[in-house]
Amino acid sequence: MSLNVFITGASSGIGAALANEFATRGACLGLVARRRDALDAVEAALPGKHHTYVADVTDREALIGTARAFDAAVGGTDIVIANAGISIGVKTEFHEDLEQFARVMDTNVLGMAATFHPFIAGMKARRRGTLVGIASVAGVRGLPGSDAYCASKAAAIVYCESLRVEMAKHGIKVVTIAPGFIRTSLTRKNPYQMPFLMDADAFAQRAADAIVAGVRYRTIPWQMGGVSSLLKLMPRWLFDRLMSNRKQKPRAGDA
Ligand SMILES: NC(=O)c1ccc[n+]([C@@H]2O[C@H](COP(=O)([O-])OP(=O)(O)OC[C@H]3O[C@@H](n4cnc5c(N)ncnc54)[C@H](OP(=O)(O)O)[C@@H]3O)[C@@H](O)[C@H]2O)c1
């Protein structure tokens, strides 16, 4: 059976790789991003016929309209992947960073809820469907200089858990994917070491397998799952000591 899959943040990186993976598996896609040129370039390289929409996930009403248009065009969506996200160094001590904080939360957390929202009524009526949140290993502990990104991904993880339990009784699965370090524009300028750095295409293959299987939570690559479990268990005094001199993500104004 051919799947109908809606993906936000599909114009580059992980979203584009997921689009390619699901298109190769025969899915019909609804692809969303803000940059029309980049979105068209992704679509042109895909096998099959798909739908593209220019929308900003922070514009909730526009996003909901877009989602409903895709759902109606394909006669019901099977998989929704809330992938659009941004990562900027944010430090609470700088006044101008509060605005960046809001932008990160709006995109990475509220944007995810606004992506899922318009599909839930239809999925409930059909008693099937899968909602996928692209979170991050960065949501497991708070990394210095990433005040907003870590907070947003921690929120995404816990939000998806709330939704997972709530949706289960309606036959809807909620899958949380926590990527480690994946080679995309988001990680290109990271000034720190990125253990187990993985190509986006290899990530997308594993993520698609986990999504189709309907797993609750999956860290990719698996080695970062081990790191993530260790981080979770690590006592605060040791975590603080290990992280105190860690290099940090540049802030928006940094060169
Ligand atoms: N790369 C990693 O190592 C890594 C690790 C953990 C988690 N993640 C997560 O994976 C997701 C994808 O990141 P990536 O690494 O693939 O980065 P990326 O290449 O920068 O892709 C981000 C995508 O999100 C879209 N986007 C950003 N803001 C948007 C908005 N307001 N409305 C609609 N689309 C928006 C961008 O498209 P436009 O600019 O065209 O809108 C782009 O397609 C993010 O949620 C990120 O936090 C990545």
Image (tube, helix red, strand yellow):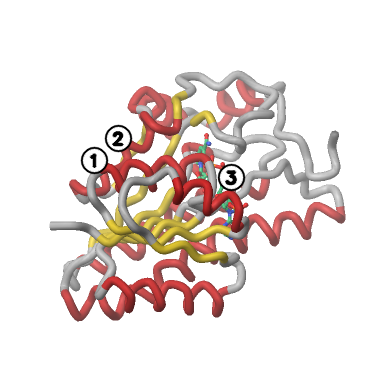
Establish whether ligand 1 lies closer than 8 Å to the Cβ of label 2: no
Q: What residue type is labelled 3?
A: Cys
Q: Is mark 1 on a helix, strand or loop?
A: helix
- Kindly state the secondary structure of the residue where label 2 is placed: helix
- Residue 61 visible in this rendered orientation of the protein: yes
Which residue bears the numbered disc 2? Answer: 206
Residue 73: image quadrant is bottom left
Please report whichever mark, 2 or 3, sits nearer to the chain's N-terminal start.
3
Residue 162, position as x, y percentages in the image: 36, 63
| Relative height, residue 139 to residue 169 (above, below) | above
C-alpha separation, residue under disc 2 versus residue under disc 1? 5 Å
Q: Residue at x 28, y 68 (%)?
A: 77
Query: What amino acid is labelled 1 in the image?
Result: Asp
How many C-alpha atoms fall within 10 Å of the one at disc 2: few (<14), some, or many (≥20)?
some
Asked if ligand 1 lies within 8 A of label 1, the reply is no
Name the residue at the left extreme. Answer: 1
Mark 2 touching mark 1, by CB under 8 A? yes
Which quadrant: the N terminus? bottom left
Residue to which mark 3 is pinned: 150
How far apart marks 2 and 3 lie (CA) works out to 23 Å
**The quarter of the displayed image where residue 3 is located:** bottom left
Which quarter shows the C terminus?
top right
Front-most of residues 213 and 21 = 21
Mark 2 residue type: Arg
- Tag on residue 209? 1
